[in-house]
Image (cartoon, rainbow, N blue to C red):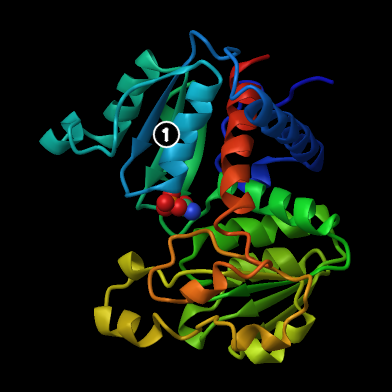
Amino acid sequence: MINTIFGKSLISVLDITPAEIKIIFDRTSQMRQLVTTKGGDDRLSHRIMAALFYEPSTRTFSSFISAMQRLGGGIIPLNGMKNTSVEKGESFHHTVQVFSRYADCLVIRHSEAGLPKLATNYITRPVINAGDGFGEHPTQALFDLYTIIEKLGHLDGLTITLVGDLKFGRTVHSLSQLLVGLSTQVVINLVAPTQLRMPADIIENIQKRNIKILETSNLDEVLAQTDVLYVTRVQKERFDNISEYEKLKSYYIVDKKKLKTAKKKMIIMHPLPIAAGEIQNEVDSDPRSVYLNSQLSNGLYLRMALLDLILNR
Ligand code: CP
């Protein structure tokens, strides 16, 4: 099969075709097998990745570093942009041009939506969007989808409930659009307070595909029918008015009591971090929770697959 992902940037889930998702998921399963049997191999030796993280990260940063190293590749040892010449005022477009001379691909996280896309105007190396402001987080959405299919076996017929900060939450912007690109047989519940509703352009994109959507602020209205409960953090860093954040941060609390009406086979997801108790610690050990186990591991396997496909013909 031709690797159409070779040399490509990944900025938005809208950049990827269903055929490419299948290629990525097949490779992800191979990576899981590789890590669990041998830990990794050296297929990316002599390739270098630069991870330019202008915003904090635990999972995305570490899993990209781990992915590259498990495949024998090298990294430029950055951890955030603090000790780079960005501190001296170097511009974004000079910074990406510099790193593109030293690395074979750039993984970029930025607080401003659109910056990873902008980088592709300045350089020819592939760019992977590792989360851009309240824009998208395409690699997260890919392994979220992989996890849903791994756990529930299929996508058609599922009711997927996205809860919390749907306005600023980039993971749900990507996941909702990825889901509807693959199946017209899903039902999507968008559960948010009025102030944090999903942006209108994303709702329009979903509706264009004749997908059944229900918007509500009441989680109890949809919980019993839900197959995938995807909870998000209210994104404090995107608020101009901190008192507005304080009012909204704990609008939804998922705890054992709340989950009593939920299906036994439902899965509970969260991109993490949990910052305001939106999922209570007591739920961590619920067998339906995947956010501290397979959702995390699949992030590593999927990023290994992507780096392999992008950097190896
Ligand atoms: N899910 C996610 O993007 O987590 P980090 O911010 O820790 O990378």
Q: Residue at x 11, y 34 (%)?
A: 88
| Disc 1 C-beta below 8 A from ligand 1 | no
Q: Position of residue 115 (x, y in %)?
A: 40, 43
Q: Is residue 273 above or below residue 277?
A: above
| Quadrant the N terminus occupies | top right
Binning the other alpha carbons within 10 Å of mark 1 as few (below 14), some (14 to 19) or many (20 upward) gives many
Q: State the residue in front, 246 or 43.
A: 43
Residue 234 is drawn in which quadrant?
bottom left
Residue 89 is drawn in which quadrant?
top left
Q: State the residue in front, 121 or 12.
A: 12
Q: Position of residue 204 (x, y in %)?
A: 68, 69
Badge count: 1
Q: State the residue in front, 107 or 93.
A: 107
Residue 117 visible? The answer is no
Q: Amino acid at mark 1?
A: Ala
* Location of mark 1 (residue): 119
Q: Position of residue 286 (x, y in %)?
A: 63, 70
The residue lying furthest to the top in this view is 46
Residue 251 visible? The answer is yes
Which element carries disc 1, helix, strand or loop?
A: helix
Q: State the residue in front, 207 or 300.
A: 300
Q: Residue at x 27, y 73 (%)?
A: 240
Name the side, left or right, on which 214 lies relative to 242. right
Q: Position of residue 146 (x, y in %)?
A: 72, 48
Name the side, left or right, on which 212 lies relative to 192. right
Q: Is residue 252 above or below residue 269?
A: below
| Quadrant the C terminus occupies | top right
Q: Residue at x 29, y 30 (%)?
A: 78
